[in-house]
Image (cartoon, helix red, strand yellow):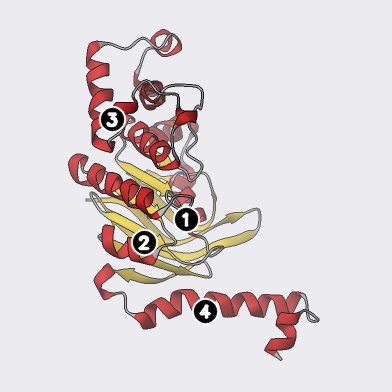
Amino acid sequence: MEQIRAEQLTLGYGRKEVVKDVDLTVRKGEFLSIIGPSGVGKSTLLMGINATTSILGGHLNVLGCDVASIRHGDLKNLRSRVGVIFQSFNLVSRLSVLDNIASGMLHRRPLLSAIFKHYSSQQYDEIYEYMKVVGIEDEALSRCDRLSGGQKQRVAIARAIAQHPEIILADEPISSLDPVSARSVLETLRNANEKYGITVVANLHQLDYAREYCSRVIGMNAGRIVYDGSPGNLCQTTVNRIYCCAKKEREEQIVRHYPFSPAAASAA
């Protein structure tokens, strides 16, 4: 079943086009990574799926909603069905692990219960299940500002799962983590993908991790998709096209805008 469909999609800010003429289909239950160098539109594409980036052209349908024409009430409902995990964690530092995870349930809990942090026995059981899924149950009552970066990211994943999303968008979830923590976080995302059938779309810089953990890889360069397929079919020639062309394009931009720069001199 299709959950995301983009056709000739162009996204940007103001009049600046960042993602250009993208065609993309994502089916339920996929674990998809978007790879490519910085500045090629990976985060813009991800946030476009969450309807936080302007659509400048084409069509985007997410979970049956036409994002270009969606209204406020429907937009709120769509975002409740799409969990987002950020590089900076976006946790409430002074709250416990338990309370941060419970915040993912806000849209389906009574207001007073949320304000006074009152949880039913069923909600406690549910929160504990999510803590076990991400391996953070031993820190349930710890304040989040006392956790390591890897632990914080696992709390963020558990909070996203508590939202009961159909899709999780992970924007550079491991870029600030050491290799051991990075693997732990990716294994946690894969576990959520397999256990709950949640579709995961993650931006990754690390090509080896994309090959190891993801079922499908999207390679981006200069705002366009230049590869879409299995990690096993990602050969060195394709990798060079994704990464090396971006470097050449940046150098050409420097030459056009700063003709007397060192890059311009070397290009000459």
Q: Is residue 214 visible?
A: no
Which residue position holds label 1? 45
- Between discs 3 and 2, the one toward the N terminus: 2
User: Residue 2: percent from the left, percent from the top?
Assistant: 26, 52
Residue 24's label in the rendered image is: 2
Quarter of the figure that contains the C terminus: bottom right
Q: Which mark is residue 245?
A: 4
The residue carrying pointer 2 sits among few (fewer than 14), some (14 to 19) or many (20 or more) residues within 10 Å by Cα, namely some
Q: Which is more toward the observer, 153 or 74? A: 153
Q: CA distance from mark 1 to mark 2?
A: 10 Å
Q: Are marks 1 and 2 in contact (CB under 8 Å)?
A: yes
Vertically, is 49 above or below 221?
A: above
- Secondary structure of the residue carrying tag 1 is helix
Q: Nearer the viewer, mark 3 or mark 2?
A: 3
Residues marked 2 and 4 touching at CB (< 8 Å): no
Residue type, mark 4 in image? Cys
